[in-house]
Image: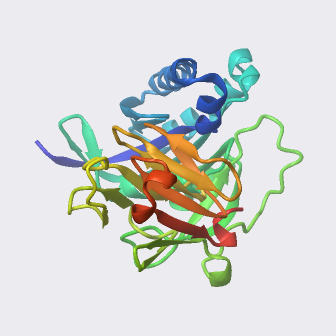
Amino acid sequence: MTQSTPLTILFADVSGSTRLFEERGDVEARAIIASVLGALSEVAESHGGSVVKTIGDEIMCTFPGAMQGVMAGCDMQRRVAHDPQFVRDNIAIRIGLHHGDALVEDGDVYGDAVNTAARMAALAKREQIVTTAASVKNFTASGGLNVRSLGKARVAGKLLPIEIVDVLWQEDTSNVTTVQRAIRVDEAAGRPKLTLRFRGQVIELSDESQPFSLGREDSNTLSVQTEWVSRNHALIEYKRGYFILSDRSTNGTYVKLGEDDELRLHRDEVHLRKAGTISLGQMVALNERDVVYFQCSEGADP
């Protein structure tokens, strides 16, 4: 049965997971990420939260109240920052959360609150907690929580941009500026943009674009009708301040970033930067007709 209820939705993901896979290999990297997600689950449950699901290097949790979610986020950051193993492996996390009405159905959560929380997570950087000002206004007014303003950000489905804040979870915040206008919607010239070129088509994506899917099925945003391309091969999303390409295929995705060597991506993701090529299922040299060329604006590579 579907029901709407006020909940705090929290997303946390592991920063630098692509580097981890490159340096440590699939088996060891997966084990490290599983250990991190396990630790985050323990923290969530200790604050009365519930783990909805884990997706790759990301965990999604719910909490009855905003303060429980915020305190859990702070403790998650501290847990990772103080764990000797995670410190040795240079592990860090990003967290985004929001309190609002959500639809609970068959153990999963949907709705505007989930979309807003996901947007907060996309804006968060390494070792940062980003939330909406509305979620924490009662706590900041009473002096029980330290935050700094990040200005306003647009969220899909909302007519006007909303105020967002950075939660200061560090024990010592003496070196942190208390007010920082880091995101402004009027800085159109600096807005991130990803331009894709495929067989004469030119497609432009912004930080507000919907996820861009590539694959053999016609339902994809870009359909590539070739036998070595999977039905739902790859996805490009703007999250955590970057355009991220995620491979979901059988044969992998070959990506070339600038002058770097061509990289084979398989069930993993990469941050698209500068300019380069994307080839689904085969190396560019074997697949020149179906290569996707991309170029990021300066705003997409902060």
Figure quadrant of residue 191: bottom right
Question: Does 29 appear above or below 93?
Answer: above
For the point 69% across and 51% down, the residue is: 260
Query: Quadrant where the N terminus lies?
Result: top left
Foreground of the two, 23 or 279: 279
Q: Is residue 282 left or right of 228 when viewed as pictured?
A: right
For the point 74% across and 23% down, the residue is: 87
For the point 74% across and 16% down, the residue is: 84
Figure quadrant of residue 164: bottom right
Query: How far across and how far down the image is residue 129, in percent?
Result: 62, 46
Question: Does 198 appear above or below 34?
Answer: below
Foreground of the two, 115 or 301: 301
Query: How far across and how far down the image is residue 42, in percent?
Result: 49, 20
> In the rendered view, how is the structure colored?
rainbow
Whether residue 57 is visible, yes or no, is yes
Residue furthest out toward the right: 175
Query: Quadrant where the C terminus lies?
Result: bottom right
